[in-house]
Image: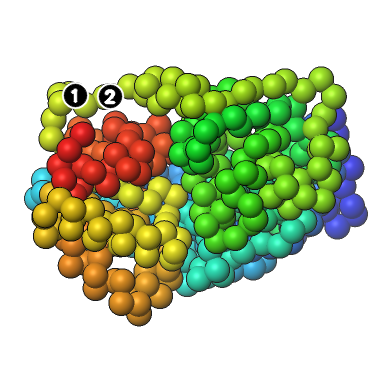
C-alpha cells in the first residue's frame, strides 16, 4: 500500500530538504508501507532510544549517527535512552571482566557524544524506565510516541494510555527527528482492541513477573484484556504502577506484548470497559497451578545447576523510588531474622540515575548500603552480555533478565531468602 503524504512530507521524500533527511523519510515510509500504514501522523512526546551502548563492532551505527550529525539534524525534543552498560564502582567485576568490558564497550564515550549532539536530554537520561517522574519523560494519555525499548513501550501504552508501536532501533530515532511515525498497529483504535481475555483466578496476588511471563508466552504479540487482577491492585497508585511495570516487562520479553488492558485499572479499560475486546477473542485462565507450571518451565542454564550464586541483580526494568525503599526494608528485616549483618550474596539494585539521586537524599540509602547491597544505574543485561560475565551463576527476580541471559529466576521472596540467608 502506497502511503499518502502531505506536500511537505513529499518534499522531504523527494530530497528537497537534504539527502540525509530524505533517507530518514524513505526509511519510515517503507517501514510504514510494510505494515499497511496509509499515512504518517505527528509525534507528540519526547523520544526514547533503545541503543545506549557503544559496542566497538557497531561501526554502522556510529556511521549513521555521524551522518545525521553532519547534516545538522536533531530530534525535535530532547530524548532519553536506555541504561549505560558499565559501572565498575558498584557492580562486582574481576580484572579480566573489566578489561573485556572496556574493550567490548570501547566506543561508549564517543557514542555518548553522538547522542548529545542529536538531542540527548542530559547526562542522567540513561534508563529503561524513562517514564518515572524523576526522569521527566512521562508521556500523557493519547500521546503518539517514537520509542523502541519494549518494557517502556508496553508501560506507556498500557499504564499511561499513550500510543506507540514496538519499533526497532533507529526507527525510534528517525521518528523523533522527523516528528512523524507511520500510522498503523497500536497507534490505531482497532489495533488496540484485545483479542485475548486473561481470566486471573489466583488465590492470592500473583507474582508480577510470572504472571507477565505466562501472558506473554500465551498471547505472544496480541493484546490481552486482563480480568480479576483488579481484586489485588484496586487503583492505579504507585504500588500498582510498579507492579504493572514489572508484569508488562515480562510480557514484552517472554512474548512480544506491546499493550495490555487491566479491567477497572488501566486508563482505556476504565474508559471503555469490555468494548475494548474484539469479536472472536480467546480465553486464557491463569490460576495458581498455571503460574507454578510456567515457573517450573524456566530452564537453568548454569554450567553447574547447584552452584552457589555469585551475584544477584534486582531491578530490570529499573526500580522505582518506592521499590528501592521497599527492598531496603525487606533486606533489613530478613537480615535480622537470619542473624546476618550483611547480604551473603553480592547484591546489586538497579535504578535510574535521577531516581538514585533522590534516593540518596533519603535515610534509606545509607541503610541499604549498610546491608552490603550496591546501587547502580546500569543495564544488568548489558553487563551479562560480557562473555566473561554471562557464565557466572547470577540470580534475579527479573523475568526479562532471565529470558535474555543465563541468569536464574527466583520470585522476590526466593531472591530475598538467598541474599540474606543463603537458602534456596
- Check if mark 1's residue and mark 2's residue have beta carbons within 8 Å: yes
Residue 69 showing in the rendered view: no
Locate residue 20, reporting x and y percent. Answer: 64, 53
Looking at the figure, which quarter contains the C terminus? top left
Looking at the figure, which quarter contains the N terminus? top right
Locate residue 302, reporting x and y percent. Answer: 21, 26
- Which residue occupies 47% across, 21% down? 289
Q: Is residue 215 above or below residue 231?
A: above
Is residue 259 shown left or right of residue 269? Answer: left
Which element carries disc 1, helix, strand or loop?
Answer: loop
Which element carries disc 2, helix, strand or loop?
Answer: loop
Is residue 424 shown left or right of residue 213? Answer: left
Judge the density around disc 2: few (<14), some (14-19), many (≥20) Cα neighbours within 10 Å: some
- Which residue occupies 51% across, 54% down? 242
What residue did someone put label 1 on? Answer: 305
Query: Of residues 138 and 229, which is closer to you in this image?
Result: 229
Query: Of residues 40 and 154, which is closer to you in this image?
Result: 154
- Which residue occupies 9% across, 50% down? 95
Q: Is residue 375 above or below residue 232?
A: below
What residue did someone put label 2 on? Answer: 300
Amino acid at each position: 500500500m502506497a502511503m499518502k503524504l502531505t506536500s511537505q512530507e513529499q518534499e522531504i521524500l523527494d530530497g528537497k530538504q537534504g539527502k540525509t533527511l530524505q533517507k530518514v523519510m524513505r526509511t519510515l515510509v517503507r517501514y510504514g508501507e510494510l505494515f499497511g500504514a496509509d499515512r504518517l501522523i505527528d509525534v507528540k512526546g519526547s523520544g526514547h532510544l533503545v541503543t545506549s551502548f557503544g559496542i566497538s563492532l557497531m561501526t554502522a551505527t556510529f556511521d549513521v549517527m555521524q551522518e545525521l550529525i553532519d547534516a545538522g539534524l536533531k530530534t525535535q525534543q530532547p530524548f532519553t535512552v536506555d541504561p549505560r552498560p558499565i559501572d565498575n564502582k558498584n557492580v562486582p567485576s574481576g580484572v579480566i571482566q573489566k578489561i573485556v568490558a572496556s574493550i567490548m564497550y570501547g566506543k561508549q564515550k564517543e557514542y555518548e557524544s553522538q547522542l548529545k549532539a542529536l538531542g540527548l536530554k542530559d547526562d542522567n537520561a540513561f534508563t529503561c524506565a524513562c517514564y518515572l517522574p524523576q526522569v521527566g519523560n512521562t508521556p500523557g494519555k493519547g500521546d503518539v510516541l517514537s520509542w523502541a525499548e519494549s518494557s517502556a513501550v508496553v508501560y506507556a501504552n498500557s499504564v499511561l494510555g499513550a500510543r506507540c508501536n514496538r519499533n526497532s532501533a533507529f526507527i525510534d530515532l528517525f521518528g523523533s527527528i522527523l516528528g512523524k511515525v507511520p500510522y498503523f498497529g497500536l497507534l490505531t483504535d482497532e489495533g488496540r482492541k484485545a483479542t485475548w481475555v486473561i481470566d486471573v483466578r489466583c488465590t492470592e496476588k500473583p507474582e508480577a513477573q510470572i504472571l507477565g511471563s505466562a501472558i506473554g508466552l500465551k498471547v505472544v504479540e496480541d493484546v490481552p484484556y486482563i480480568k480479576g487482577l483488579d481484586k489485588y491492585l484496586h487503583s492505579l497508585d504507585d504500588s500498582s504502577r510498579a507492579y504493572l511495570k514489572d508484569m508488562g516487562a515480562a510480557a514484552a520479553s517472554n512474548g512480544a506484548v506491546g499493550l495490555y488492558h487491566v479491567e477497572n485499572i488501566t486508563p482505556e479499560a476504565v474508559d471503555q470497559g469490555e468494548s475494548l475486546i474484539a469479536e472472536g477473542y480467546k480465553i486464557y485462565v491463569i490460576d495458581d497451578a498455571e503460574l507454578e507450571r510456567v515457573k517450573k518451565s524456566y530452564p537453568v542454564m548454569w554450567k553447574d545447576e547447584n552452584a552457589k550464586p555469585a551475584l544477584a541483580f534486582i531491578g530490570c526494568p529499573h526500580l522505582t523510588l518506592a521499590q528501592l525503599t521497599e527492598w531496603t526494608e525487606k533486606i533489613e528485616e530478613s537480615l535480622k531474622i537470619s542473624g546476618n549483618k550483611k547480604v551473603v550474596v553480592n547484591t546489586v539494585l538497579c535504578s535510574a540515575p535521577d531516581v538514585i539521586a533522590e534516593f540518596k537524599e533519603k535515610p534509606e540509602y545509607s541503610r541499604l548500603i549498610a546491608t552490603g547491597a550496591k546501587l547502580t544505574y546500569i543495564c544488568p543485561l548489558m553487563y551479562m552480555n560480557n562473555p566473561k560475565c554471562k557464565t557466572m551463576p547470577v540470580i534475579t527476580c527479573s523475568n526479562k533478565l532471565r529470558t535474555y541471559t543465563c541468569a536464574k529466576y527466583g520470585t522476590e521472596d526466593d531472591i530475598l531468602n538467598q541474599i540474606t540467608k543463603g537458602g534456596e
